[in-house]
Image: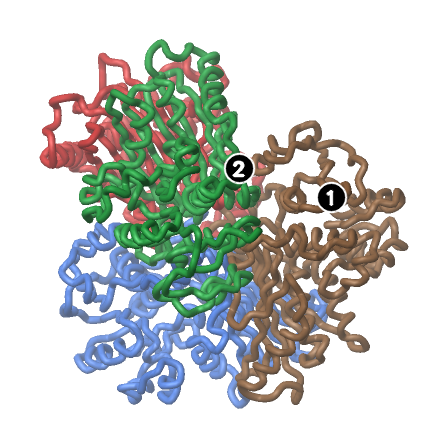
Chain colours: A blue, B brown, C red, D green
Amino acid sequence: MSKTRVGIINVTGYAGVELARLLYQHPEVELISVTGRSAAGQRLGKVFPHLAGITLTIEAELGDVDLAFSAMPHRESANEVVHLVDRGIKVVDISADFRLKDAAQYPQWYGFTHPAPQLLKQAVYGLTELHRSQVASARLVANPGCYPAGAILALAPAVKAGIIEPDIIVDSKSGVSGAGRTVSLPTHFPEANEDVSAYALEGHRHLPEITQELGLLYPGQSLSVTFVPHLIPMTRGILTTGYASLVSGKVTAGEKGRDELMHLYLDFYQDEPFVKVVDSSPHTKHTWGNNLCLIHPTIDYRTGKLIVISCIDNLVKGAAGQAVQNMNLMLGLPETTGLEALAIYP
Amino acid sequence: MSKTRVGIINVTGYAGVELARLLYQHPEVELISVTGRSAAGQRLGKVFPHLAGITLTIEAELGDVDLAFSAMPHRESANEVVHLVDRGIKVVDISADFRLKDAAQYPQWYGFTHPAPQLLKQAVYGLTELHRSQVASARLVANPGCYPAGAILALAPAVKAGIIEPDIIVDSKSGVSGAGRTVSLPTHFPEANEDVSAYALEGHRHLPEITQELGLLYPGQSLSVTFVPHLIPMTRGILTTGYASLVSGKVTAGEKGRDELMHLYLDFYQDEPFVKVVDSSPHTKHTWGNNLCLIHPTIDYRTGKLIVISCIDNLVKGAAGQAVQNMNLMLGLPETTGLEALAIYP
Amino acid sequence: MSKTRVGIINVTGYAGVELARLLYQHPEVELISVTGRSAAGQRLGKVFPHLAGITLTIEAELGDVDLAFSAMPHRESANEVVHLVDRGIKVVDISADFRLKDAAQYPQWYGFTHPAPQLLKQAVYGLTELHRSQVASARLVANPGCYPAGAILALAPAVKAGIIEPDIIVDSKSGVSGAGRTVSLPTHFPEANEDVSAYALEGHRHLPEITQELGLLYPGQSLSVTFVPHLIPMTRGILTTGYASLVSGKVTAGEKGRDELMHLYLDFYQDEPFVKVVDSSPHTKHTWGNNLCLIHPTIDYRTGKLIVISCIDNLVKGAAGQAVQNMNLMLGLPETTGLEALAIYP
Amino acid sequence: MSKTRVGIINVTGYAGVELARLLYQHPEVELISVTGRSAAGQRLGKVFPHLAGITLTIEAELGDVDLAFSAMPHRESANEVVHLVDRGIKVVDISADFRLKDAAQYPQWYGFTHPAPQLLKQAVYGLTELHRSQVASARLVANPGCYPAGAILALAPAVKAGIIEPDIIVDSKSGVSGAGRTVSLPTHFPEANEDVSAYALEGHRHLPEITQELGLLYPGQSLSVTFVPHLIPMTRGILTTGYASLVSGKVTAGEKGRDELMHLYLDFYQDEPFVKVVDSSPHTKHTWGNNLCLIHPTIDYRTGKLIVISCIDNLVKGAAGQAVQNMNLMLGLPETTGLEALAIYP
């Protein structure tokens, strides 16, 4: 049987090349076309030497594929995706353009009026662990943002179980590749090295995603999320620390409460191949290059707070790996196909 | 007039050598003695090449000084300090041994019974900005921990003004030098590089300091502080992100509220030479090597939360620089003497 | 057909865990036993969370395997290997204990008298590209040191072709994982970060390997190699810059000479799956996590010098990947089996 | 007596801001004017928060100064400097525009015809240690490039003493700030982090400087220098490793030869405040933020090679600190004024 033919639109960003790396190693699909404007006409392996094993040339237009990944910037991606869906091509959109269900949020958070609000309803938010069956039958999957992937997985079990007050602090620490491949002063090596800073204090674009998805687990009550992202001098990885007050009486006091919490999380993710609930504070390094999300929930008894730590590789579970996980489901393949690599340590 | 003679006990840790660096450049005191057990008998500049300009030999016993800095490990420092105070020598203790007012906390947090509880009462907590006049007349100053320095300065104005609920989240990100010069697996370069992790989720020793000092500003009500430190792949710097709910009605809604908050902070620190309230999110890099604490307070209107960011160099304002600032006051010198260096950028 | 059973002696160093990672993903062998003294009795995935997918327990003694990797320290490995070979188990020795053909060099460079000089003759130096057929039939392969792997591959074509004078400078830059997992002050994060230094100026243990192997390609004349290694603030990667004077008249002057040189290298490595001769200056990043060696030879016409740059991942082509490459040949498997992963970028 | 008034043209690069930092702390001069095109009109401390203590506004035109530093890009600097010299203002030019004595080299290396060849003769190459008396009386000093500063100081004693063959290898490792503050893909954090690469293999612009200055010490014979710079994932620092064959018979064989070499270097730099000959392999970290050059010469007896290691902070001794050192001499001040700061460690 011939392999499914897939392509990447705008391969030249970090999510795009990470997709190319993963798809090249995928046994059940064939990467047959990659596009990119400025680099069109060049061999992929010339522009990205680590991909020299892939003998594709970057094209201006996508070839004839069964499924496409769009790694276009937001706004541009929406227009491209509309055409692909019209042509019957399955799409995983890495951009933010189909993540928010409410079209009214696009002008506010992304500065444009959404060109295809009707498609927003069809689109499935591609955090597989929360929407697995819908992803499997979707024609268009909106791949989650890197921060939301780690934050939502960290908090979903507690929110769903109703053990925390609906007032959540999400403090995230991200490696610099999360800012993309486009050069800028804050990501210039001498500026970002030996430095930590918080940013987007006025509100980061990933906030509405986090609120939307956690809100789905907490129907009937509004959820307040305070989200502050930080830039960390490393290339890959996001560690998210979530804080919320425990609802009185829902969790037993003392060490027994921690056990209950751990079991709640273990149960929630018991069959998940890519989410591991761990019993000590995790390190982003332990997910470096692979598709795992490591989660450690605990309780601060002094203050009655839930503290949850999650770690992902922002370019894998936070982008390209998650996209392949979604593709696998959309194509009826085992979910883990091509995503079995262990993290690279140290 | 001859300069005041000062010495450093246990110069061989990072706080100790940073003190040596600062004191060597100090125009009004003379560093005449440094001790260290394992390195005793060696030239300071041989063990620490960057200090080659200082012609001292590391000794087993402290020479005849007017003021001593103890950079001993906790527990050991207490015993040493008792003797120094008995001999009439002024002391700045870099260790934790005289920071907590309540002797009962030492067994719990540091695992030993305090040998001189009576001295705890005399000792002044040396966060100069909060206890300036007491520091000036103190014989024994307990220099703050690195995390508390940044966290307390970040939150003190809001706590004192009563604009926040007494339930505070402190999420801190520290460079690896904060873990000291003693080698360990978590601070081995290949482990700490390209990694972020949270630690001490059971409760970090710096928590009681933070609670004690903020509590003094909030008399009559108990204060709940949830504190999670994180290890960041850089050498120097601590960024602390503080979160708390605003008390309803205390701050005007909308942009005007942010202005009020900014003025509250500007007023609180208006005459402080080493605390700068800044109008955008600060970077630890902008304090690299100097004694500044940069603070940026803001409000998340969506959630009614105060967010405060503070940045310090953990070895300067978080240790040795703060100690020199205290020494200056104790000796009747202008507070900024020897601490005027700008941060080194990039 | 059942898979070949393999094991790792002393899995707890960086080479050992990298071997475990690669062997776990290898389709034709089964990792059935790993040993380690201090960690014996613990689950591998507990000590190394990135290996949690491997359900082995670290043992005190190696199980019943067909082929063993020894990642013991030098001297200890020799004794272990002797027993394994006696029992008819094929061995790839990651240590230095069987790399040098001349037993007399062990006291000088490694400080011990070799316990099995007769085995030195049988042992094959496992730089596959130079000794492929011998590796295929070997019972004992001595896996190359990390520096020699990159240095020998960089210079072999020029030495063999006789185009350079036998007086070679090898200046290598290594990431800190090359120093191993044992903690030390020079590899403590705050010391190694933001620092570069040269070391082993008196002579590094990898020098005799380089001289031995390049000497084999240059029979009848003695070869002089000056080798200086440098420690670089990164985790993985070795870049080696080799310098030598071109023999007069052997390479055409001008741009044509560079072409000749490039073709000489391309021819030498034309069928090699893991050595790529590239036409611009390579980056260690482009080999991060995979088994490639990238080589760029050029000529400085001003000075008549050959300059060759090579890049490898010190833990893959410089250790564990090279070991798997050797194992594949020893087991009659395709040489690239289990080593197809692309480098991870960025 | 009023202080000498100095200014910085194009303060907005890394050399420019480092100059501002040093001059602000200088007790004998007053920084009264800084210029910069894109940032003109903004407060210096707004654009560079670490300079918030300096109350200057960035101007379009330089104010009325006695001495100016030009930190303009090459080619543009030459034109600016000509005007300044015409107006009788003393100048230290940080650019390359007056470093090369032979005007014919500018088209070849810098791509422009020099607009003021006559000024090249007047200009003094500002490596103070080699041209001290000329610097003291100069109206125009050409501040050395960062690589030449470390390379020339490393090799000058050996070249001058005639103990090495005139065929020198210079292998340099530089932190990323050496590439300047202008953003680019190779200096984008995710690209430069965890990576080492060689560059400018066709010939780096700093080569003719090195050759010119070492050639002056070796009259009557032509000197061949092979120079390869490397980019290292750190912010500041250059380590240079120099290699050359010892002239037979000039240095005693054995350990005594190393002593002779050490004494040759110690004698050469015996009165130099900023060059320290050290007896073990130096680290760039030990010069972090200060004006020292650390040099360690040794001999590889196996190969008869001189090996010299030098370390500098590329922005201090390699740029701004060297410029202040030159300024001090030009103004008749003690050479070390304002440059006494110790390196910051760790």
Residue at left offset 35%, top offset 42% = D142
The image quadrant where one finds the N terminus of chain A is bottom left
Residue C59 visible in the displayed image: no
Residue B343 image-quadrant placement: bottom right
- Between B306 and A241, the residue placed more toward the observer is B306
In the picture of the structure, the residue carrying the numbered disc 1 is B72
Q: Do the residues bearing badges 2 and 1 touch, measured as CB atoms within 8 Å?
A: no
Residue A77 rendering spot, x and y as whole percentages: 26, 76
Q: Residue type at mark 2?
A: Pro
Chain name for mark 1: B
**Res A117 quadrant in image:** bottom left
Residue at x-position 40% and y-position 59%: D12
Give me the chain letter of mark 2.
C
Q: Give the Cα separation between the discs numbered 2 and 1.
A: 22 Å
Report x, y in % for residue C28: 31, 44
Helix or strand or loop: what does disc 1 sit on? Answer: loop
Relative to A143, does residue B94 appear above or below in the rendering? above
Q: For the residues tagged 2 and 1, is the chain the same?
A: no
| Circle 2: element type | loop
| Position in image of residue B116 (x %, y %) | 88, 51
Q: Is residue B293 visible?
A: yes
What is the three-letter code of the residue carrying label 1?
Met
Pick whichever, A7 or D136, lies toward us: D136
Residue drawn at (32%, 35%) of the image:
C240
Relative vertical location of residue B12 with respect to residue A118 in this rendering, above or below: above
The circle on residue C186 is 2
Residue C301 higher or lower than B17, as above or below = above
